[in-house]
Amino acid sequence: MTEKKTPSAKKRKQTYEAGLFAEFWAKIILRLKGYSLLEERYKTQAGEIDLIAKRGAHISFVEVKYRKTLEEAAFSLSDHQKKRINKAALIWLSKQSDLRYDSLSFDVILCAPWTFPAHMKNAFEEL
């Protein structure tokens, strides 16, 4: 039998820091596009939403993905993650009685080393 190797503490820290860096760039991209940030790393029992942003009367629930290439990042979002993000978004919306909006979307910002991040609007539909 082969043993499954668990990532070292150093590797986990590097991955965590890369994720923070990607979220930092994602926030800059959103702000440059005229979005205001409503939440960062919103956590629920159902799951976490990396960023929640608003532009005009539109709300975007944004997942940030960082991988070696933008293509790898694009394919790293699983159906299970989409469901968790959707459930977390419903929880967040249920707590926003004063918030007015006309439309919602689930966006993804793809990040990779030495590459400008890519913002994919409406990357997936509600599941």
Image (tube, grey):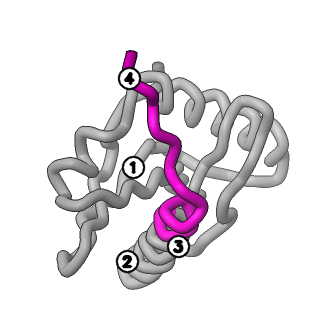
Is there any visible trace of residue 3 in the rendered image? yes
Distance CA(mark 1)–CA(mark 3): 22 Å
Report x, y in % for residue 17.
53, 73
The type of residue carrying mark 1 is Asp
The type of residue carrying mark 3 is Glu
Q: Nearer the viewer, mark 2 or mark 3?
A: 3
Q: Nearer the viewer, mark 2 or mark 4?
A: 4
Q: Which mark is residue 2?
A: 4
Distance CA(mark 2)–CA(mark 1): 13 Å
Precedes in sequence: disc 4 or disc 3: 4
Distance CA(mark 4)–CA(mark 1): 38 Å
Report x, y in % for residue 92.
74, 42
| Magenta-tinted stretch | 1-15
Precedes in sequence: disc 2 or disc 3: 3
Q: Residue furthest top?
A: 1
Secondary element type, mark 3: helix
Precedes in sequence: disc 1 or disc 3: 3
Secondary element type, mark 2: helix
The type of residue carrying mark 4 is Thr
Write down the residue under mark 2: 29
Write down the residue under mark 3: 17
Write down the residue under mark 1: 107
Precedes in sequence: disc 4 or disc 1: 4
Q: Nearer the viewer, mark 1 or mark 3?
A: 3
- Name the side, left or right, on which 109 lies relative to 44: left
**Which one is nearer the viewer's eye here, 12 or 113?**
12
- From this view, report whether residue 20 is shown above or below residue 8: below
Report x, y in % for residue 51.
57, 60
